[in-house]
Image: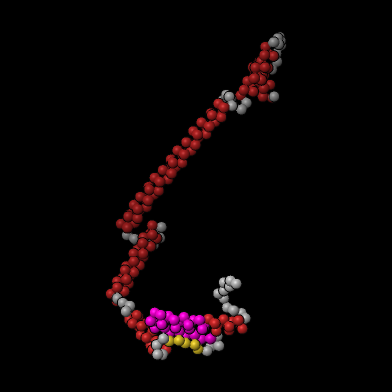
Amino acid sequence: MVRGKTQMKRIENATSRQVTFSKRRNGLLKKAFELSVLCDAEVALIIFSPRGKLYEFASTSSMQESIARYRMHTEDAQAKIPVDEQNVQQLKHEASAMMKKIEVLEASKRKLLGENLGTCTIEELQQLERQLEHSVTNIRTKKMQVYKRQMDQLKEKGKALAAENATLTEKCNLEPERGPNEDRANARFADIREVYDHVETDLFIGLPHEARIRCLLFKN
């Protein structure tokens, strides 16, 4: 029977938790002993049960010797960490210089925005004016470039639409449009004029002949 994978979380049942602790404690102590024998390693293991009972294993004569060796090793490792006072002072100096540069840039930025100008001399104000004029010139040049690029894109789009319209007109065998109402008006004007050309009258009251025809067209 294959045993399922154990979930790494606290066992809620007290009896099962105690049984698991005893089994795994003995297994851990056994592994520590095997590691010390097979690899000739100095192993020290300390275990406290949930109730506070101590279990330990030391491959040396006593646990105190292993703990003393551990403390000596950590102290030596901390003593080997170099403390370069000169390097620290250099870093502080670089940080201070960087802060000064940031302050200068912030002051220059505020002056360009028109703030804190009370302490500026006439030369400084003239320099600010030249900087702003140069910036405005660059901005306007860039704006015109953007406008020109957009206009070129719109022209190319218009040409493409005109070519597509011509292609569709050719496919449908249609003539180019002359206007929405021009052909209709001309046809109706010709019909009315033909009717009036066959009518003979001796008496006419009103607008001239052509004007009356135009009025009839607009009324209809």
Q: In the drawing, does residue 37 fall left or right of residue 195?
A: left
Q: Can I make out residue 215 in this image?
A: no
Residue at figure coordinates x 41%, y 82% from the top left:
37
Q: Can I make out residue 63 in this image?
A: yes
219, 165: nearer the viewer: 165
Percent from the top left, x then y, of residue 167? Answer: 54, 29
Residue at figure coordinates x 36%, y 64% from the top left:
102
Q: Which residues are magenta?
A: 25-49
Picture quadrant where residue 147 is located: top left
Percent from the top left, x then y, of residue 22? Answer: 55, 84
Q: In the drawing, does residue 118 fall left or right of residue 162?
A: left
122, 70: nearer the viewer: 70
* Magenta span contains residue 64: no
Q: In the drawing, does residue 83 fall left or right of residue 187?
A: left
> Residue lying farthest left?
86
* Magenta span contains residue 42: yes
Picture quadrant where residue 74 is located: bottom left
Percent from the top left, x then y, of residue 174? Answer: 58, 25
51, 183: nearer the viewer: 51
> Residue lying farthest front?
1
Vertical relation: 155 (above or below) 169: below
Residue at figure coordinates x 55%, y 88% from the top left:
51
Residue at figure coordinates x 47%, y 36% from the top left:
156
Quarter of the picture containing the N terminus is: bottom right
